[in-house]
Image: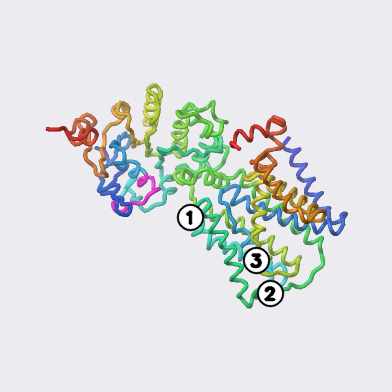
Amino acid sequence: MTAPIFEVKGLTKKFRGLTALSDVTFQVAPGEILGLIGPNGAGKTTLISLISGTLLPTAGEIHFEGRRIDGLPAFKRARLGIGRTFQVMKPFPGLSVLENVTVGALFGATEGQEKKRAKARELARELLEFTGLTRHAEQRADQLGGPDRKRLEFAKALALHPKLLLLDEVMAGLNHVEVDEVVALIRKIRDRKVTILVIEHVMKAIRNLSDRLLVIHHGQQIAQGKVDEVLADQRVVEAYLGKRRQ
Amino acid sequence: MKNLQRAGLALLAVGLAAVPFVASDTLVQFGINALLVATLTQGWNIIGGFTGYPSFGNSVFYGLGTYGTAIAMAQLHLPFGVGLVAGGVLGVAFALLFGIPILRLRGPYFAIATLGLAAVMSAIVATIGFAGKNIGLILPLFRGDTLFYELSLVLLVAATGTVAWLARSRFGAGLVAIREDEDAAQVMGINTTMYKVGALALAAFFSSLAGGIHAYWITFIDPGSAFDPTLNVRMVIMTLFGGPGTIFGPVLGSFVLSAVSEVLASKVSTVASLFYGFVIVLAVVFMPKGLLDLFQGFRHSGFRYFAQNMRRFRL
């Protein structure tokens, strides 16, 4: 394995008495797609929030490109090149689709280049083309339908020029055709040399996409490794389906 | 088209500047008040309209501006210019100091905290001997309504210019993003704390300068009038009436409502405030996005505009 672009060591998050995440450790290689799975309430979104900086860890370390980042505020991590989408999508509802993406370009990792609005808008238009939103560019974000909202989340996150992209259940609520479209989109993003951490419940998609899997259950990391091996793991099966009666 | 608009604006500014040389004293005095209130409204537009933080503490900035100027002039016998700067510094410093803790609160919690601030400040000032306790301070008399008028106009133009800059700058885009969704803004690389405090400081700057001008013009201040919470309510209503988050909406809204309340107060004082409230209820129901949106929408779809609004906002 080449030197990891991203590394988490002993990451723990407690909400008062409740331990949401306990001693999670993993590495991600540049250009890799790591799938993060686990039953509802396992702590997957908490992990993404800890990495993006919207939550601060109780213990543990996060390293990105050789730099420790767990003490940095969210906006600084975004400028370093960590983009995320939200499970409960967070568009800027009153702004047009184009403006939504322009904001990301104005403040993203390429700061200094895109400070001019015209330049940022140009980049935003490219991303709308890339995510297939061009014909909705002037529409208000809150008037978009479900699948297009997901695309907008992608476009907004990509506008930062992220090196690491955290995707939180971007396929929930989509039909088969739409899931395939999103899978293709994620592959296209990886081809742009973006490292991706993806949370997903749609097994078919995660199987197709991921290079490796990380499984979390009740805040504990229970398995990690190659997709087929992990899915065959006894503890993983039990976490999803319960123990087999003897 | 754009040049035509610019020319129109320049003509309007020149026209407004000429008012004291042609109009009656009463009209000029009304003008000074209207210009200062419009400046306050524009200041509220920065923090409330652009950033989405419904501040009820802008009257505190105004009050600090009046007291800064009044103390410098009445107690320290400094010239007006120095007093104005002192008021401005006081207002901005207060915004920076209290903005950081208070802007951590969101929505109604922020509104309540700022509302408390106004009441507390008035109570504190009333106990300070240097600030004239609850009796107040009397400033040196200066008769020059023309000067006050032009000064107020310059301040309003500066405030509106700042808002116009916000509407097209990176800083302004950050503020709007915070208004639309603060969590999303954060993970898109916006230093939300700094931006919010910056917006509040800008609002404080214009509000406290307006307070300073008003203090010297009126020559008498006391805690009750300097920290008047209804002044803040007027800023909110006028911004919403004109069009929050727009460049000229708040100015238009405050001019229209100032004129309406002036006329009503002189004609039918008993029902004046009742009518004022009635206007606001109608405005909220039929044009929740403000006067500017009404004009644009009406040109586009006529009377159906009202029906569209009622459907869109489920009223």
Q: Earlier in the sequence, mark 1 or mark 2?
A: 1
Q: Position of residue A100 (x, y in %)?
A: 52, 37
Q: Is residue A53 magenta?
A: yes
Indicate the secondary structure of the residue bearing disc 3.
helix
In the image, residue B156 sits, relative to residue B228, either above or below, namely: above
On screen, residue B102 versus residue A50, left or right, reads right
Q: Residues within 10 Å of mark 3 (few under 14, many from 20)?
A: many
**Residue, far left:** A246
> Toward the viewer: B284 or A113?
B284
Question: What range of the chain is rendered magenta?
Answer: A49-60
Alpha-carbon distance for marks 1 and 3?
26 Å
Q: Measuring 14% from the left and 33% from the top, which residue is drawn there? A: A245
Mark 3 touches mark 2? (CB < 8 Å): no
Alpha-carbon distance for marks 3 and 2?
19 Å
**Residue, far top:** A177
- Whether residue A222 is visible: yes
Q: Is residue B291 magenta?
A: no
Q: Position of residue B49 (x, y in %)?
A: 61, 47
On screen, residue B53 versus residue B147, left or right, reads left
In the image, residue A116 sits, relative to residue A203, either above or below, namely: below
Indicate the secondary structure of the residue bearing disc 2.
loop
Nearer the viewer's eye, disc 1 or disc 3? 1
In the image, residue B84 sits, relative to residue A61, either above or below, namely: below
Indicate the secondary structure of the residue bearing disc 1.
loop
Mark 1 touches mark 3? (CB < 8 Å): no
Residue corresponding to mark 3: B87
**Residue, far bottom:** B129
> Toward the viewer: A2 or A232?
A232
Q: Measuring 82% from the left and 60% from the top, which residue is drawn there? A: B146
Query: For residue B135, which numbered disc appears in the image?
Result: 2
Query: For residue A160, which numbered disc appears in the image?
Result: none
Q: Chain of mark 2?
A: B
